Image (spheres, coloured by chain):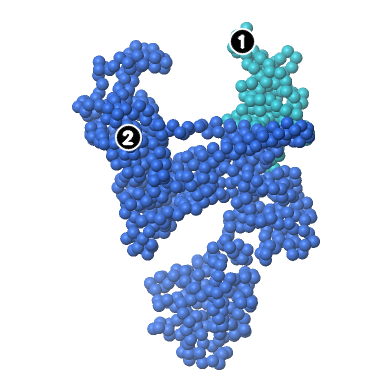
Chain colours: A blue, B cyan
Amino acid sequence: MIELDELVHDFLIESCENLDRIDRDLVVLEKTPDDLSIVAGVFRSIHSIKGACGFLGFTRLESVSHVGENLLSKLRTGELSVTEEITSSLLSLVDAVRSMLGDIEKTGKDGNNEYSELVAELSRLQALENSHQAQVLSESPAPSDTPSIESLASEPIVDANPVSNATSVPVVPAIATAVVEIAKTESPVESPKAVAASTSGGEAKSPSAADNNIRVDVGLLDKLMNLVGELVLARNQILQVSATLENPTLIATTQRLNLITTELQEGVMKTRMQPIGNIWSKLPRVVRDLALSCSKQVRVEMEGAETELDKTIIEAIKDPLTHIVRNSVDHGIESPEVRVARGKTAEGRLSLRAYHESGQVILEINDDGNGIDGKRVKAKAVERGLLTQEQADKLPDREAIYLIFLPGFSTAEKITNVSGRGVGMDVVKTNIERIGGLVDIQSNLGFGSTIRIRIPLTLAIIPALMVSCEGNRFAIPQVSLLELLRVEPEDSSTKIEWVNGTPVIRLRGSLLPLVSLGQELKLCSQEKAFQSGINVVVLQADDRQFGLVIDEIQDTGEIVVKPLSKRLKAIPVYAGATILGDGQVALILDVMQLAQRANIVSESRNANTSDVDAASDVDTHSAKTQSLLVFESSDGQACAVQLSSLTRLEEVERANLETSGGQTVIQYRDQIMPLIDMSMALGGCSIVSSGDAPTTQVLVYGSEGKAIGLMVHRISDIVHEELKIISSSTRPGIAYTAVVQGRVTEIIDVCQLIQNYAPEFSDNACSLTARDLPFVPDVKDYLEQLLPTETAQ
Amino acid sequence: MNSPAKKKQYCTFQLGNLDFGVEVLNVQEVMLQPTITAVPLAPQVVRGLMNLRGQIVPSIDLRERLGLPTSTERLPMCVVLTSDDGPVSLLVDQIGDVVEIGEEAFEPTPATVQGETRKIVAGVYKLENRLLLVLDVDRALTFELEVCGAA
């Protein structure tokens, strides 16, 4: 209940502001009827009022604004042009909405007045052709009457004169028209108010909801914040002085000053920061109502609601966020039947995440719905004339999803209350870019989409570690901080080792590359940086870890991030600057950029398998534990293959082995299956000729259509364990060597084997080499690529 | 003669043996130079950042900018200019008076003045016993962007 009240309360404040703006815009619009940006502005304002009504259940208000929106929509697309009559009706609409808001505030309901006349009038105007507009005279009582000059009250004329004088249009006819214009815009403003007053018994001042809140210019807050910062510095100095003077009165006063300053500082800070949960808390209801109206089931998950953002940023992302969430529910998540048919749970999931990353706040809105269909997006864009067919054909589907950010784009099949008017993602994008953010979208057709918003956290306060290097102090955001190390030169367990000039240390068994901050910032030479015992800050950049070598670790603290001057933004390694307790400036390091600069995060992440171990907890390819089938080759060497891609194990009679075209084959389930002799492949002697057992074991890969077998000497075990990779490929057919159950074991690269020993099996896939695949290539994937072409032949 | 309306006020400062002037409208304040935090990797002309009442302001070493010999010592004064990217501080040797000069004393920079000086000097005022070089604020600061862009 409290939540609802708060929701309505916010809605009232916001709508009152919107209405005031519409009032102003409409008056301007009448003077410059061709300015479509104003129409668009008014349209959006009405749209958001209407949208909010929908959630809050104010159906009357919704239906009235809906009609207005339809009219504005036509104006926006140019189907109708702005006339005085239309403006008048729109202004009376504003008044109607205003009086309904007044009712809501008093009674919690949107009144009993249907405003049917106004609705009829707006609908009529909307249906008009351009040519007819001029000659209409309506009988509806209130606003739409085209005011004749005689009927104008004298009052507006008096008002109007100074206005036209002020704008220095001294020509007499101009005054006359100005009078008419102003009078026309003003008269409807007056009349419905009177109506409202008579119906609802006097709503003298409508927005009393706003009485307990004042809106303060953020610029003013900024100024206050800076002043408080100065006050803190002055306080610090006085504290120092008073300590030396030993004057009891001064000391007492100083302590009071100290306390007050601290509280003031906290207070001013608080005025600006808000947890993102404030705006999130409204979303579950929005989602619930919306899901209900489109008969879907949606569960909302939230993570990081305590992430604090600057007030300005919170305000700026509120609407975009609501838009995105509505889009996800309306377009993304499928109806329960469809979901079940696709093997998903009937209830859709919408998750919101917020977290700090390298001095920015990241918001992720993820749903497990249908994702975005690049082809459909293209088709719509062409249909809406945003793209030519030719352009569309050239555009890859993957990139096509970005088309949803174009103004006027919507994939909704029909215009609903919820979405489909094409004021969606373009507004989202412009609003977020206005605050210096970025919107990115990732979609996996059939599995959902993720919208990621990156917001710079210009004024946010972040915890940071202060370090020094060559006399300079730097702040490192604590989000990227993992641990602190001290490396003594004589300590053999953590000594610095060199890989061809690159320093590394062993940290709990894995190698940690070292980067000297002094060297990266060209403050000192490498020799100096690693001369003696060093302090290392272990940092996380993307999915890599590295150690940053610095001179001294100072302390941790909350710092206020301030943006760097544009003139210095081109230096990538700084995320901003901050002012320290002693009043000095310190630079904030951008860990990500620093890592890039030092080549820690490089282009190819798949290439070296030896790194997999070091990054095992973050790298998805390393997939914690592996299931392996271990077997012995004829010379007793342990080998293993991944169990997951294996189809089955067979034991075959040696007598059944045949040879066809130099290849050992066997008749297997009514087809001829080629066999690869693993012992021979790995450089041993042939199993067929050497062994004396009557049978041999075969690992079968592939399916009914086409299968291939690997003959092995002896299967010893199936293990599930975390691999300790020792080295990468030592010879053909081996992906890498690892320790499995205490034995050095060669992990077989089956794809490569098949290619080498049964080339006819992989004729059509010469281009696909095992090297292209990350980690150990999955044979199943590999075969799937081969088989369709094979079976088709 | 010219009407007084054509007179402009200049805040003057010295740099080596040169007299410079900046229109007072561009000057936010003149102050003793506070401690500066160096910015590694920044172009040479950027001495660093300073804290101006809670605002972080880049400091430009005008000596470096003009190719004059730079002292590693702390330059004593700074002139804080307003720019569209917030205030920027210029480090100078000494602050002079604010002078009011008529348009008639103005002359474009002599063609023989070359190099960096030419780029940032908008013109010269002939004063009684000295010449006052008018600093082209935009160009003096725009240059920074280019340096950074290349860096």
Spot occupied by residue A569 in the image (x, y as percentages of width and height): 61, 40
Q: How many marks?
A: 2
Q: Which chain carries label 1?
A: B
Residue flagged by tag 1: what amino acid is it?
A: Pro
Spot occupied by residue A335 in the image (x, y as percentages of width and height): 33, 57
Relative to B21, is A692 on the left or the right?
left
Residue linked to disc 2: A103
Residue linked to disc 1: B4
Residue flagged by tag 2: what amino acid is it?
A: Asp
Please tell me how crowded label 2 is: few (under 14), some (14-19), or many (20+) other residues with Cα within 10 Å.
some
- Tell which of B48 and A256 is nearer to you: A256
At 34% across and 26% down in the image, what residue appears?
A30
Spot occupied by residue A500 in the image (x, y as percentages of width and height): 72, 60
At 50% across and 46% down in the image, what residue appears?
A276
Relative to A247, is A758 on the left or the right?
left
At 39% across and 31% down in the image, what residue appears?
A207
Residue extending furthest left?
A: A139
> Which numbered mark, 2 or 1, is in the foreground of this view?
2
Spot occupied by residue A696 in the image (x, y as percentages of width and height): 51, 87
- Tell which of A775 and A371 is nearer to you: A371
**Is residue A97 in view?**
no
Asked which quadrant contains residue A44, the reply is top left
SS type, badge 1? helix
Q: How far apart are marks 2 and 1 (CA)?
A: 63 Å
